[in-house]
Image (cartoon, helix red, strand yellow):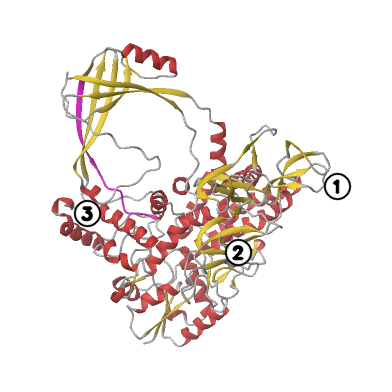
Amino acid sequence: MKSLLIVESPAKVKTLSKFLGKDFTIKASIGHVKDLPKKDIGVDVEKNFAPTYVVIEGKEKVMKDLKKAAKAADQVFLGPDPDREGEAIAWHIAEELNGDSDKIFRVEFNEITEKAVKEAIKHPRKINVNLFDAQQARRILDRLVGYKLSPLLWRKVRRGLSAGRVQSVAVRLVVDRERDIEAFKSDEYWSIIATLEGKKPPQFDAKLFQIDGQKADIKNAEQSTGIIEDLQGKSFIVKKIEKKKRRRSPSPPFITSTLQQDAARKFRYTAKKTMMIAQKLYEGVELGEEGPTGLITYMRTDSVRTASEAQQEAKEFIVKEYGNDYAPQKPPVYKSKKSAQDAHEAIRPTSAYRTPAAVKKFLEADQYKLYKLIWERFVASQMESALLEQTSIDIGADKYIFRATGTVVIFPGFMTLYTESTDNGKEDDGLLPSLSENEVLKTLGITPKQHFTQPPPRYTEATLVKELEAKGIGRPSTYASILSTIQDRKYTEKAEGKFKPTELGTVVSDLLVERFSGLMDYNFTANMEDHLDKIEEGGYKWVDVVMDFYKPFDKDLTEAMASLGKVTPQDIPTDQICEKCGKPMVIKWGRHGRFIACTGYPECKTTKPLETEGTGNGTQQKTEIQEIDEKCDKCGSSMVIRSGRYGKFISCSKYPECKTTKGLGIGVKCPEDSGEIVERRTKKGKVFFSCGNYPKCKFATWYKPVDKPCPKCKASILIEKRTKKEEVLACLKKECGYKEELSPADSEI
């Protein structure tokens, strides 16, 4: 019996071919084959939001090839990724094949291993209509918001802008945090540290903890000085030593959000980069004689559940490598969050015996680092808890109590292999000497330290994903898209690796919050995700969910179109005078951000790049310059990052004496000379990308390069091609012709 298996990615084809015999033909759809049309809304609001799907432009040849292969097959197995998007791909392929439905089946691979693949083929199912409806509802909601709100922004703010149901709420998070930072009032406080020494080394520090039985609260230098003077000559005596043993349990295996967070903290990977690397590890990597092999389970999941076979294998590995003491008697059980769909296992290696050291030579550096992280987290999650002894020592000096704390690891358990990183980078407790109660300590010094309360920090990749998850905004498959989209659309930017709203992002967010409070409400967005889950479970009808959303949204939209005036930030006065006409210059807001222009416009068209940022009162500016570890090729001075009319760029710190400038790198190597590709702009402000070694290297492209090799011709990069006709990742070499679809969620999220 001849069988056809259709998967999403060409990378999977090679891996799956190793497991299935000659009776199987394996083809790739290269992502979605059908979608709502690009040039039209594609949703009939008057007819229960009936969608119109069309074959995606450029996929006609792929679809023709799939139809031909399906005709020659006795059975057709549809094996796209095991999630809503994958179900939609399977649905649309089945619809296009238009053949005997009795011979079309859906199969799922949570991991691409021989056992999992053959088991899936043995137990196929029909396409899950509820799962498809949940994806369809999300797609239609996003299309309605994108197509209806964007024209409002065009008319009221600026042409070319776009809005999205989820991305707009994510931008609001960043804007709200920035406002919290701006409104924060810092308070002064002091701490007092005594450096002490007992009969045995080492010396150690103790912090003032109580004064007259009350918590020490030192507000200023005068109080601090008074306490230190009062402490002079007083004996420091050990009053109480308290030792507590406690167990520290390992963290559960990774889910999508925690993987993105830990990769961001440890490696500074963006969520998008983490998912691209994980996708390769899931689809299969060439392991020498073993051939293409899937190294991890499916990486879009919100469940910490683990298959019993995987736990058993991990236990055997732990006993063999670390000993019986490191393996718990019963397999650990971790609970997923109540909101988890629990459709897939946690992210884990497909085999605990496939250690990072064993596969390192077959992996790229980034692949190895991420695989090692996933492997260590999973194996550690199956190990015994660590046993710690925490010591707390209270030291009296008259009415003052100082406290020192320290932790000793009695049994490392899982900590032998892995410890989770944190967002605040808290320091470990110091090492304490062996002391006894009533022991008189030698005072080596008493040091006051001034502190100020700090505002809430800006979001990093890790903390923004954490906040999105906590508020129920988006799902595992969308976090990376959300973070990429809000930057690509210039609504946020990164300053020292942290998200900061652009002026454009703030203006758009404020407008949407004022006019579409329901859409922009955090709880509303989270509730919508719950409704989509209910559609998937068969509890809600997708048309009802879309209708309940659309009625109030359409009303708010109509009112905004009729009553809202033009929305632009006000001009900011400066102390500069136009060199041509003598009139005052102001900071204006244009398509590419702030710039300095003459108030005599349109008679005088003098403009200047902006290298300053308003302080809030409209009359003073603060230079926005960021130093970097790089020297000028011409004069040897330090290079800095400046902000200009067309965005940020690198220039010599000695400007204007030295006018050396260069574009900011995007983290992708040039395919011609391996120099770093930088983002540049034409005189009219149009973005393009070229080699940082120009003019020695003339490589340039209008499309954003992506650090991903072409699966077809092995070219070192792909390009992100967004046109009116298509949105795809394409091979840089036109003659190759390789294309893969950008997720529809990326365009209207």
Q: Which residue is mark 2?
A: 695
Q: What residue is drawn where x is 44% and y is 19%? A: 219
Amino acid under disc 1: Glu
Percent across and percent down for residue 675 are 51, 63
Q: Furthest residue to the left?
A: 324
Look at the image and give the residue range highlighted in magenta: 239-255
Nearer to the camera, 546 or 620: 620
The residue mark sitting in front, 3 or 2, is 2
Q: Please, what secondary structure does the residue beneath circle 3 have?
A: loop
Q: What residue is drawn where x is 22% and y is 52%? A: 383
Q: Which residue is mark 3?
A: 331
In the image, residue 502 sits, relative to residue 160, either above or below, namely above
Nearer to the camera, 594 or 274: 594
Structural crowding at the residue carrying mark 2, measured as other residues with C-alpha within 10 Å and reported as few (<14), some (14–19) or many (≥20): few
Amino acid under disc 3: Pro
Marks 2 and 1 sit apart, C-alpha to C-alpha, by 38 Å
Structural crowding at the residue carrying mark 1, measured as other residues with C-alpha within 10 Å and reported as few (<14), some (14–19) or many (≥20): few
In the image, residue 431 sits, relative to residue 546, either above or below, namely above
- 235 falls in the magenta region: no
Q: Please, what secondary structure does the residue beneath circle 1 have?
A: loop
